[in-house]
Image (cartoon, helix red, strand yellow):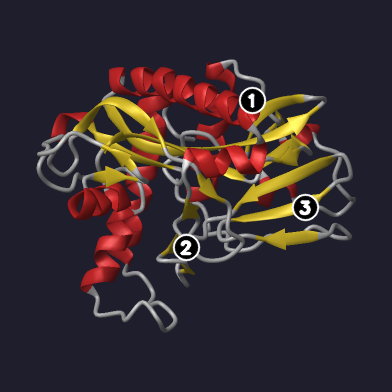
């Protein structure tokens, strides 16, 4: 069943800020993260939503938080267990809402790359490096790296995040925290990648976010979703080219061919692109969880 597209939510009497995809409500010691069906590309939120996208993202993240057994901020995704103002439309929030503990957010995107793709491939072609890390010569597009690499970035409020060196990260958060973030991010990527590979998905790269709570670093935001990661079908993997994917690359490709100048408001997506994109998100969910998407 395809549900109506949810582009924006509203909860009476609660402060809210809206990101590209999520509506974030302040509940005091907690936040309510509502993943809408908005989709962004090239730093624009598109006028067309993808049905069920927010529900897929929320439930994939919850699945990983449980599977990885890493300290995290998620309390529940069950709206019936959330204390919300009277009159809240819980049905509209069901399946796409996460109640999480507030943390002091670390201002670093912890990016881990296992394959040579995207901006990393573009840089490698120019300089033989990815985010300043020198790689072996002669690698092809989408090549699997001998070992995943950690490439931090600063968190930007608008526009693209900026890649930084590990040394710059140390200046921002200190050496001990930088080492812990690198080690834990690489380990989670390793475990997540092994699990996903067994289910037919290659995780080319991803980003983790962390926050301080009660004196320790815990995982926050989303983890290993098609929006925070580059997912490839393992059966179709061929180095030396760009790869088919489970994420919004399908939307990006259509936009690039549409004639849009990437400067003016973006065009609406045609129905077939919407349907195909929804299918890709749901396919990722079902492969990872082993469950049919409800």
Q: What element carries label 1?
A: helix
Q: How far apart are marks 3 and 1 (CA)?
A: 32 Å
Label located before the other in sequence (3 or 1):
3
For the N terminus, give its image quadrant. Answer: top left
Query: Which numbered marker is on residue 176?
Result: 1
Rendered view: 267 above or below 279 = below
Q: In the picture provided, is 188 more to the left or to the right than 234?
A: right
Looking at the image, which residue is at 81% across and 37% down? 82
Furthest residue toward bottom: 264
* Quadrant of residue 171 within the rendered picture: top right
Q: In the rendered image, which residue does mark 2 sit on?
A: 49
Between label 2 and label 1, give the one nearer the viewer.
Answer: 1
Q: How far apart are marks 3 and 2 (CA)?
A: 21 Å
Q: In the rendered image, which residue does mark 3 sit on?
A: 25
Residue 270 percent location from the top left of the image? 31, 69
Label located before the other in sequence (3 or 2):
3
Res. 10 in view = no
- Between 198 and 212, the residue placed more toward the observer is 212
- Between 56 and 100, the residue placed more toward the observer is 100
* Quadrant of residue 150 within the rendered picture: top left
Residue 242 percent location from the top left of the image? 17, 48
Q: In the picture provided, is 38 more to the left or to the right than 74?
A: left
Contact (Cβ within 8 Å) of mark 2 with mark 1: no
Looking at the image, which residue is at 36% across and 77% down? 262
Q: Is mark 2 on a helix, strand or loop?
A: loop
Between label 3 and label 2, give the one nearer the viewer.
Answer: 3
């Amino acid at each position: 069943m395809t549900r109506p597209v949810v582009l924006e939510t509203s909860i009476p009497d609660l402060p809210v800020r809206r990101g590209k995809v999520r509506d974030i409500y302040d509940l005091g010691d907690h936040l309510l993260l509502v993943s809408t069906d908005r989709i962004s590309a090239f730093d624009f939120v598109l006028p067309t939503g993808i049905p069920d996208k927010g529900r897929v993202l929320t439930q994939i993240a919850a699945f990983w938080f449980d599977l990885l057994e890493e300290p995290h901020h998620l309390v529940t995704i069950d709206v019936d267990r959330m204390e919300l103002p009277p009159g809240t439309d819980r049905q509209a929030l069901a399946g796409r809402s996460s109640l999480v503990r507030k943390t002091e957010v670390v201002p670093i995107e912890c990016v881990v790359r296992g394959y040579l793709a995207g901006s990393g491939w573009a840089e490698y072609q120019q300089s033989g490096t990815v985010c300043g890390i020198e790689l072996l010569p002669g690698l092809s597009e989408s090549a699997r790296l001998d070992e995943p690499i950690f490439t931090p970035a600063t968190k930007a409020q608008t526009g693209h995040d900026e890649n930084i060196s590990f040394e710059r990260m140390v200046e921002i958060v200190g050496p001990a925290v930088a080492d812990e973030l690198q080690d834990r991010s690489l380990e989670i990527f390793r475990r997540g990648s092994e699990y996903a590979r067994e289910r037919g998905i290659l995780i080319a790269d991803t980003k983790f976010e962390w926050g301080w709570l009660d004196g320790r670093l815990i995982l926050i935001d989303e983890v290993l979703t098609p929006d925070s990661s580059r997912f490839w079908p393992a059966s179709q993997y061929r180095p030396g080219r760009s790869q088919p994917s489970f994420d919004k690359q399908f939307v990006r490709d259509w936009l690039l061919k549409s004639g849009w100048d990437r400067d003016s408001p973006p065009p609406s997506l045609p129905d077939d692109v919407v349907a195909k994109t929804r299918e890709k998100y749901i396919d990722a969910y079902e492969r990872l969880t082993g469950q049919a998407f409800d």
